Image (cartoon, rainbow, N blue to C red):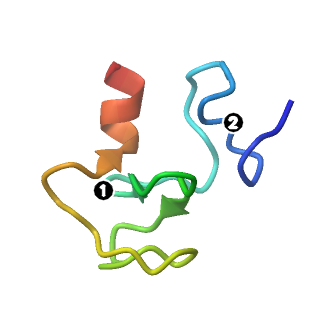
Amino acid sequence: MSRSRGYGFGSGAVRASRPGWKSGDWICTRSGCNEHNFASRMECFRCNAPRDSGSAMTYENYLAA
């Protein structure tokens, strides 16, 4: 089973608090990326896609889904 950088998004991982996650952190929504980014970043560190505040998935939203 492939996992993105060990965070397990999209792999059916248990939804629990992850070490290193802080309020406001977000997940890149660009297709094929899904990378965890710190709240202070305005673009994805992996693919350089701009943070879209309207559709960016935050960790809080991920837990609520």
* Quarter of the figure with the C terminus: top left
Closer to the chain start, of discs 2 and 1, is 2
Q: Residue at x 30, y 56 (%)?
A: 24
**Which residue in the protein does label 1 denote?**
24
Looking at the rendered structure, the secondary structure element under dot 2 is loop
Compared to 45, does 59 lie above or below? above
Q: Residue at x 61, y 41 (%)?
A: 18
Q: Residues within 10 Å of mark 1 (few under 14, many from 20)?
A: some
Kind of residue at disc 2: Gly
**Which residue in the protein does label 2 denote?**
8
Q: Extreme left residue here?
A: 54
Task: From the viewer's perspective, tell me whether residue 27 is left or right of residue 10.
Answer: left
Kind of residue at disc 1: Gly
The image quarter in which residue 53 lies: bottom left
Q: Residue at x 65, y 19 (%)?
A: 14
| Gap in angstroms between the C-alphas marked 2 and 1 | 19 Å
* Quarter of the figure with the N terminus: top right
Task: From the viewer's perspective, tell me whether residue 57 is left or right of residue 35.
Answer: left
Residue 49, given in percent of the width and then of the height, sits at: 38, 74
Q: Residue at x 52, y 75 (%)?
A: 47
Q: Residues within 10 Å of mark 2 (few under 14, many from 20)?
A: some
Query: Viewer-nearest of labels 2 and 1?
Result: 2
Residue 21, given in percent of the width and then of the height, sits at: 51, 52
How many numbered marks are there?
Answer: 2
Disc ID at residue 6:
none
Residue 25, given in percent of the width and then of the height, sits at: 39, 57
